Image (cartoon, rainbow, N blue to C red):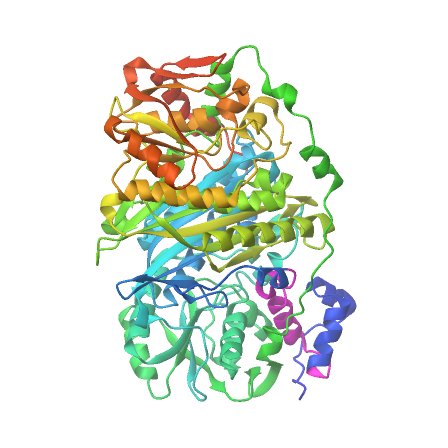
Amino acid sequence: MSSPQSRPGDPQITPELVSEHGLSPSEYQKIQGILEREPSYTELGVFSAMWSEHCGYKNSKRMLKLLPTKAPWVIQGPGENAGVIDIGDDLALVFKIESHNHPSAVEPYQGAATGVGGILRDIFTMGARPIAVLDSLRFGDLNSGRVRYLFSGVVQGVGDYGNCVGIPNIGGEVYFDKGYEGNPIVNAMCLGLMKKDSLIKGEAEGVGNLLVAVGTATGRDGIHGATFASEELNEDSQSSRPQVQVGDPFTEKLLLEASLELIHSGYITGIQDMGAAGITSSAAEMGGRSGNGVEINIDWVPVREPNMTPYEILLSESQERMLVVVKTGHLKEVQAILNKWELEADEIGCVTNDGLFRVTEENKTVAAIPCLALTEGCPTYEREGKESPEIKSLRSKDLSHLKIKSSGYENIFLDLLGSANIGSKRWLYNQYDTTVRTNTVIAPGEADAGVIRLRESNKAIAATTDCNGRYVYLNPRMGAKAAVAEAARNLVCVGALPMAVTNNLNFGNPLKSEIYYQFREAVLGMSEACKLFETPVTGGNVSFYNETSSTPIYPTPVIGMVGIIDDIKHLTRPFFQESGDEILLLGNNTDELGGSEYLYVSEDLVAGEPPIVDLLAERQLQHSVLSMISKGLLQSAHDLSEGGLACALAESAFGNETNPFGVDVVLQDRLEPIPLFFGEAQGRIIVSCKKHSGNQVLQTAKNHGVPCRLIGEVVPASSGFRIAGRTVSVELDIETMSDRFFNAIPDLMNQKNDP
């Protein structure tokens, strides 16, 4: 392959420089073999970005092939900007989740804001209008000033960006645990809606068609952002702030509208966000998908800083930029559309037939690499995985003595209700616009999943994000199954049939055998659950190297799941509706306590075997609840998760703060009070119904093979909260419980934050 000309000032390529670019000696040898020569400095930067973990998925691609990705309703699976499913009525739902962990750790506001911007672009570049966002967040304990600073910055960044663009935030989750002390997890999910025939892909179709850069000019912000996301954080990571992009939501809004108009104009054949690795990844991936090549004239790329080199321009991750393939002869029409939206459109190259990613400067070639070598040619690895003896020991820890208390159950209960993981998150979601565009039916805090109506029909879309990192830490395969199962339970509790999954796999350094073990086992557990639930994985994101000074986060494979509510009249909420309604429990209580919030809050302990997940029983539970809802039998439905049965009952009692209720529940289980009240056994949902519907609920559960029993009734708030076991009862007034629940996070945040 012809050698590009050297540029004055480019450094000499040495083993040290190769290592600084995140490439191993064997990978560099492979590059030399592909090119049949030494790479130029610019080419080294291009390979570094495209073969980074963030872009190339080198340590995950082989395992990801084990996930189910196909179903009759899947229109587009993994490999594009986002997944697409058929939801009927000639409509398609586009959705994906992405991470922005490392940037948020060093610059929380911009890191989170640009994460939202990036996931929005993934959706509208498919031809869909974004209709909702969700976020899945993880931080250390809020008693740390540093954590409070990160948390408040991330929440503000997520809220400001989404609010400015005008996309409602309909849900998500936030967890606090020392396992995320140095490395927060910031995952953003977006849903989009479109007509099925509006789908467009990120392909460089049509030899001779023009490559056009749309949006903001290219600056030096974000250079090597992809590489930064593919390494561990350390004490020097604050120096990586220049690798964190700066977002502009107002330009994003213009870009959204302009992109959708371009797609519908017929003047373009492909469009892609300039995300990780900027122009390099968008151009190389579009060329690779189509089997064509691309040529970029670096002199034509609009820049906002003087004397930028090809290396800097190609690897910049400046925000709010798109690469568009324009049909020959239609550049003026495209520019007219973009001018209407006050955006620039500059021709920067063309589609070629030689399969190369070629870059020129002053008519001299500075890079010439096969597109497929940058994408499909990225080396992939299947590492050795071995469980950590320390975690194995934690999992086998005897917890029997922690299940027995002589007294103090009311205080334990109040401590759980006042913990950051169980208490109300309204401090967070009140900073988000949750109802803009007026399609939100269920906003954050109102149910187990967020819901958006479809104006074109009686249907609605439900979405949720779920994962308990402690479970995955203690048992990766079982914990991943639990994440999928909880996501499905959350959807069915609002009346939605689970349809598909997008995942964000957040792990530590995969080169460590114990981390790769966690990743492998989690993927296997997720695969098993998604196959049984018939919820194919349509795409997502892998985020490795989430470590600070060699201390990894809990393995956190976040599940973003979407479902369909066929008729919005079947919409169900978790809150009790009327005094006198019966309360029934679906599923069985157990004495499992491993990985529970009780252990963390009361004993400062993460240990034990996490709750077992029976996937077949979970599937039967899903169909049972959906059947009850479709028959109009239920007044409410609420999934049991953190804090167990007692906390779930409390949330259903006073979660609707304006209309609280009390409960009177009696449990006959032969269990110790701690696991009975606060254990987190899987496969359980509490429902309420009118007295005359109780027998039908019991019969429907029996028909589906699901354990179900009457455990109590809804009472007026003035009657208080009572849950009784065989030997112990917990009795509290609703006002005291409500105060602890709704002020949990404000009380913790009312302290000085330290950057």
**On the picture, is 12 further left or further right than 678?**
right
Question: Camera-side residue: 265 or 243?
Answer: 265
Can you say whether 488 is above or below 273 in the image? above
Can you say whether 546 is above or below 39 in the image? above
Main secondary structure found in the magenta portion: helix
Q: Could you say where residue 582 lies in the image, as x and y percent from the top left? A: 30, 25
Q: Could you say where residue 297 lies in the image, as x and y percent from the top left? A: 51, 82
Quadrant of the frame with the C terminus: top right
State the image quarter where residue 717 is shown.
Answer: top left
**On the picture, is 654 further left or further right than 150?**
left
**On the picture, is 740 further left or further right than 557?**
left
Residue 131 part of the magenta-drawn span: no
User: Magenta residues?
Assistant: 35-59
One can see residue 107 in this view: no
One can see residue 393 in this view: yes
Quadrant of the frame with the N terminus: bottom right
Residue at left 30%, top 79%?
A: 266
State the image quarter where residue 692 is shown.
Answer: top left
Q: Could you say where residue 185 lies in the image, as x and y percent from the top left? A: 54, 46
Question: Camera-side residue: 194 or 86?
Answer: 86
Residue 56 part of the magenta-drawn span: yes
Question: Camera-side residue: 455 or 247?
Answer: 455
Can you say whether 567 is above or below 670 in the image? below
- The image shows a total of numbered marks equal to 0
Q: Could you say where residue 339 lies in the image, as x and y percent from the top left? A: 29, 73
